Image (cartoon, grey):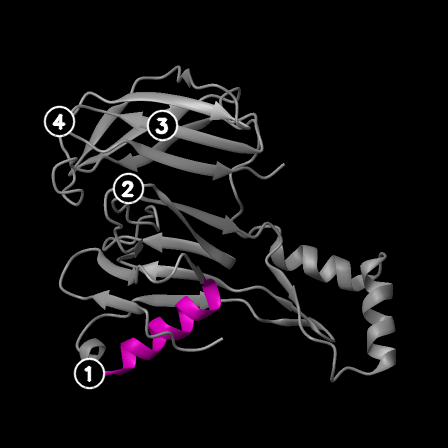
């Protein structure tokens, strides 16, 4: 895990945009954190407020550590827009990702771009087991014993119970935000649209969502999802509007 040259920051907008170049379809939480901290320290970042904070990596036992959770500070991650063709699925993996706006309030961590679908694979336990090559045989035995029910499991549970997790299966959501993008330039957010919304559950046929879509502003919209509409392992949401690209969003639920 290290600095990645395919990650860049636009410091001049609010929220700041952290762009993953179109040569990549996924980024790890660790690489994202390492790169942002490095860019904070170079010339382009020293005159700006911090862009990321991190928590985790506490050692729970030999080879076992709390996973990494990072918070973007007035910033969002964007996978570089693709040319009009087939949507490209991208992913953020290996930990937990959250974001705060300029006022310290929570906001979506992903900035939507043309012809990309981004899945954030949140970790429900946020723990990691490191390579055991340098660990003694007794340490390995202790880890195995811990996994079967000793204090190691209790320690992991105490550390991770309150960390963010993926959307629970069959859980109602009062507000699911998303954006609509211009079908002319595939970049500009589209405001004032009448948006139709559908859902496909586990590859099934699309059906209309129950709740109406309402506008937040600046091309952002929101909709409430019922427990029935999220009762699937893979939930595919489809949003359409005149003058806007079709927006497809995949949500992998946590059973």
**Callout 3: few (<14), some (14-19), or many (20+) C-alpha neighbours within 10 Å?**
many
Q: Secondary structure at mark 4?
A: loop
Find the distance from the CA under tag 1 to the CA under tag 3. Answer: 42 Å
Considering depth in this image, is 143 or 233 the residue closer to the camera?
A: 233
At x 57%, y 31%, the residue is: 169
Find the distance from the CA under tag 4 to the CA under tag 1. Answer: 40 Å
> Which one is in front in this view, the residue at disc 4 or the one at disc 3?
3
Q: Is residue 41 magenta?
A: yes
Residues at discs 1 and 3 in contact (Cβ within 8 Å): no
Magenta-highlighted residues: 28-42
Which of the 4 quarters of the picture holds residue 182? Answer: top left
Q: Which of pointers 3 and 2 lies earlier in the amino acid sequence?
A: 2
Q: Which of pointers 1 and 3 lies earlier in the amino acid sequence?
A: 1
Q: Secondary structure at mark 2?
A: loop
Find the distance from the CA under tag 3 to the CA under tag 2. Answer: 17 Å
Whether 118 is drawn above or below 137: the answer is above
Q: Which residue is mark 3?
A: 238
Q: Which residue is mark 2?
A: 85
Residue 40 x %, y %: 28, 76
């Amino acid at each position: 895990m290290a600095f990645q040259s395919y990650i860049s920051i636009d410091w001049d907008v609010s929220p700041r945009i952290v762009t993953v170049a179109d040569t990549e379809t996924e980024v790890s939480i660790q690489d994202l954190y390492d790169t942002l901290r490095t860019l904070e320290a170079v010339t382009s970042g020293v005159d700006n407020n911090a862009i990321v904070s991190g928590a985790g990596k506490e050692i729970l036992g030999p080879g076992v550590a709390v996973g990494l959770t990072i918070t973007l500070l007035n910033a969002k991650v964007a996978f570089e827009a693709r040319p009009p063709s087939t949507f490209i699925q991208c992913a953020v993996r290996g930990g937990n990702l959250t974001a705060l706006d300029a006022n310290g309030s929570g906001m979506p961590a992903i900035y939507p771009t043309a012809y990309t679908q981004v899945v954030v694979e949140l970790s429900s336990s946020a723990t990691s087991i490191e390579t055991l090559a340098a660990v003694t045989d007794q340490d390995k035995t202790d880890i195995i014993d811990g996994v079967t029910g000793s204090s190691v499991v209790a320690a992991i549970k105490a550390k991770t119970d309150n960390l963010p997790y993926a959307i629970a299966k069959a859980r109602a959501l009062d507000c699911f935000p998303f954006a609509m993008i211009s079908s002319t330039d595939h970049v500009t957010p589209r405001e004032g649209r009448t948006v139709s919304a559908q859902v496909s559950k586990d590859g099934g046929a699309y059906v209309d969502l129950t709740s109406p879509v309402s506008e937040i502003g600046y091309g952002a919209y929101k909709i409430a999802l019922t427990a029935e509409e999220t009762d699937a392992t893979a939930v595919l949401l489809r949003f359409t509007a005149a003058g806007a690209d079709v927006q497809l969003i995949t949500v992998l639920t946590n059973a």
